[in-house]
Image (tube, coloured by chain):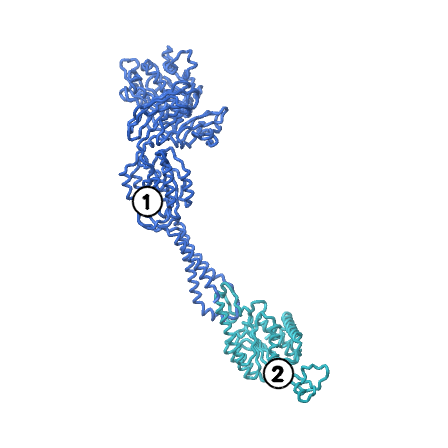
Chain colours: A cyan, B blue
Amino acid sequence: MASDSQFLDPAAIQRAEVLGLQARQIVEGYMAGEHKSPYRGFAIEFAQHREYVPGDDTRHLDWKVLGRSDRYYIKQYEQETNYVAHLILDGSESMKYGSGKVTKFDYARTIAATLAYLILHQRDAASLAIFDSAVRSYYPRTDNLSAIHNLITLLANFVPEQTTSISTVLHDLARQIKRKGIVILISDLFDEVDDVLRGIQHLRFSGSEVVIFHVLDPYELEFPFKGTVEFRGLEGGQKLLTRPSELRKSYLAEVKEFVDKVRTGCERNGCNYVQVNTATPWHEVLSSYLATRQHRYG
Amino acid sequence: MSFLNPILLFGIAAIAAPIIIHMFMNRKVKPVVWAAMRFLKASVQKNQKRMNVEDLLLLLLRCLLLILLALALARPVFRGAKGSTLVRGSETAVLLIDNSYSMGQNDGGKTRFDQARDAAEQILDSMPGGSSVALLFFSDVVKAAVPDPSYDLNLVRKVARDATLSDRPTNVDQGMKQAFDVLSRHQGGTQHIYLITDGQSLGWKQFDDIAKMIHSPEVKTSVILVGSPEEHNLCVSDLRMSSAIASVDEAAQFDVEVSNFGDSEARDVAVRISVDGDSPTDEGVIESIPSGGAKRLALFTKFRTAGYHTVTGQINADHLPIDDQRTIAVHAMDDVRVLLVSGDTGSDPSEDATFYLRHALTPISQAEMEKYFIKTKTIGPAELDSTNLGDYEAVVLANVPDISAAAQDAIAAYLTRGGGLIIFPGTKTRAQFYNESLAKKFNFLPATFGNMRGKPDQKDNFFTLQAKGYDNRIVSIWNDPNAGTLATTHFYCAYQLKPETGHTDKAGEPQVIVKYDDGTPAVMERPWGRGHVILFSSSANTSWNDMPLRPAYLPLIERTLGAILDRQDARLNVPVGSPFEIVCNPEWVGKDAIITSTGEKKEAGSLRRVTLVDGVPLLRFNDTEKAGTYEAAIKTEPPTIIKFAAQFDPSESKLTSVAQVQMDSLAPDAQIVRWSPNTHIENQITGKGGGGSEIWSTLAMIVLVAACAEMTMAGIFSEAK
């Protein structure tokens, strides 16, 4: 967890502002591009009917009432406050890897910040947990948009340092979450797949909707290394000397098997699985996901 | 197995290169911090063993490739026993071609040398690929035309075609030694000497040594004999001037010796003599020359001008043209100046020590003295110091007691330049001075003066000269009884001549000219420097003998002077290949001279310069490879022409072939091929197999295949898996 001194650190503050600005731009860009109501987001419920007046959006006409009574009524909605989005961000050392300027963690926290901004902007509640082998930073549930700054500051100033144990964290969270909500897990999932899937299964069992943003670096997906390379593990400090070009196919097969297993496991558990390549712009990932979600949930 | 280029075997050390690269490659790594280690580890676990095997395979293949490459470059040769039937491999060969002048013999068509060149071309045509050939021409010297074996056989072929005959005698031993020397410096392969010669017996004098070389198991030898046996050959084996002095407009006698090297008697051999290449001035016929014999014919000519002339003795041409004529150079003089130093003038002119000498040298009246070609000047010993000896062709010391140190040095310088010194003792002669200074200190004298024999006043107790067996050319005319005799001269008194032994750089071997009847030397001679010293044991006048009163005195003195001059002329005639040098006028030092041989244009002549050597102005010329006349034109005003001549060795004219028995004795170790234009030499030589076979080309192919395999394997192994 970030210390007070870090919050006062001008660099940390700047990082938070950049991250916040970035998240806001992504959300606003998304909204402008989609031309959709911000209320058609994650957790909105029907409230009452009122009579149609010219100028109302015809999309909100209740066609069933019109069919039965030949009268024009508009459906009105109200915010569902029972739903909360739990943003769970992997802050283990493996997330520090980045073949370019952006590490997986940078990318992941930008997604988290963006989603937090979007959720709070829609007046939903959100909480944030950053974990490695355990939860290291936590921001409790809030539906106050003004809390976004603190939340983003937390994200911006977290430094991955520990090895990961995703399943433990997921099991803990599953036990802690009292009310059903949306659990958004952002991680590279570099852990035992079966354990991870069991953790996800536990979350689903607790009634939560689970969304997995599986963050991977393009080099991890393509393995383009040449010559003789000594790979130094980010977690555990292992070293491995080899000629990667001769191993590329074998490595990619391993990665594919892993990704396929995760994807299959997620789908089997009714989770939304989103594979994220850090080379892809954030807004594209978000747009793509939200479009899919909108299509799925109307 | 041996190697043609064993030094390149060190290239095998290059196998360290791939090993080092392999190790270095593993050290020169790029570190990458990596997150997805689990997948990488799984992948490595599946592939590492395979990659290690591939690495090892590639390393072994690369090492093998370098070893094979080094082996191929070192050119290994598998040797078989001599005469085995291994596949004939490339050869390191020496073409050893006889270019002695007997190879100029022709039987109406091609000369033996032409045939030798044709045979050489056939040999070159039959050489297996990758062969290298050196080309040596031999006579009594070896000329390395292509000194080291060359792979450019066309070059060898061209050099062989352009080669010319020498005018030298043959010596197979020399050639074989050098051929072996060449091969010893170029080890490996089938070492093969192709000896192409006419098989003249003269060249095989050291037959045992040659046979020993041919017996070498390391080197294969093929003897290719060219030319058909010649049954007739006449040769002008000698030409010399028998007149004492060559002077202008005086008849000069030349003896032409013709040798018959044929199997049968030669009859009616026409002999001609000519001067400076003009029409013959005299000719004669030798009625009969027996087989193996030689006969002389005296022919006469005159020199119309003073200076250098060439005299050619010639017979009709036969199958070996070079020896049908012989040329010598002669210096004809219009003035022969003789300095007489008298040590005792006596009370009466006739008692002067030089009285009889002067008259013998100028046997004419006082009125004719001016016109006579011999000019004498008589001085006393004291005047010797102030006299320039270089103005005289000869200096005579007659009864001179001793001479000053300065005079001794002047005589040394005079002899060094080629002057002549004649010494007659007498009553005043101080024998001790002569022995200590002139004999021991300067080595001028061919003998020292010993005890006095006889007494001047006991004329009844005389002794005489030998009556026959005159070997020296000064006295050789008295071998003919018609010329009179020397034996009638009475000697009452004489020094015993004790010959000096050995020789030094300047003093030559002493020789006896004539002996007394008891066999002790009466007159001796010795070359000294470029000059000549003749020492008499008795007086020049009648005080110790009656020789001046005898008819033989005049020709003896004249021939003695002639010998001095002849010695000077002898330097004009050198054996082929020997250096020529002549003492020049000191004023010519630094002047250039163009030297041309017979038929050679002035533009093609050799440029030389008159230089001072040890204080002596000399013109030197070493390139006397062709027999015949040479002309040196010294750039003086007007130009000075000096003619000289190179003489061929007549022994080479004996064309007798080496005995068949001897050739047969070489057959176990060498292939003896009698070549004719219809002979296919390849069948005769290669049919018996070579001494080894080279495998570099096979190795090179394997290297190529290994290189391709390496590239392919490296490509496959480095593909992503």
Chain for disc number 2: A
Whole-percent x and y of residue B116? 36, 39
Between B62 and B259, the one lying in front of the other is: B259
Q: State the residue lying farthest toward the right.
A: A54
Chain for disc number 1: B
Please indicate, yes or no, whether residue A136 appears anywhere in the rendered image.
no
Q: Amino acid at mark 1?
A: Gln
Whole-percent x and y of residue A93? 54, 72
Whole-percent x and y of residue A79? 65, 83
The numbered disc on residue A22 is: none
Give the quadrant of residue B153.
top left
**Residue name at image x 45 percent, y 68 percent:** B47
From this view, report whether residue B624 is shown above or below residue B357: below
Left-right relation of B680 to A126: left
- Looking at the rendered structure, the secondary structure element under dot 1 is helix
Give the quadrant of residue B354.
top left
**Residue name at image x 32 percent, y 44 percent:** B684
Q: State the residue lying farthest toward the bottom.
A: A69
Q: How many marks?
A: 2
Left-right relation of B567 to A131: left
Q: Amino acid at mark 2?
A: Tyr
Whole-percent x and y of residue A176? 56, 83
Between B492 and B555, the one lying in front of the other is: B555
Provide the residue designation for mark 1. B684
Left-right relation of A123 to B356: right
Q: Residues within 10 Å of mark 1 (few under 14, many from 20)?
A: some
Provide the residue designation for mark 2. A83
Please indicate, yes or no, whether residue B474 appears anywhere in the rendered image.
yes
Give the quadrant of residue A39.
bottom right
- Which one is in front in this view, the residue at disc 2 or the one at disc 1? 1
Q: Residues within 10 Å of mark 2 (few under 14, many from 20)?
A: some
Residues at circles 2 and 1 in contact by the CB criterion of under 8 Å: no
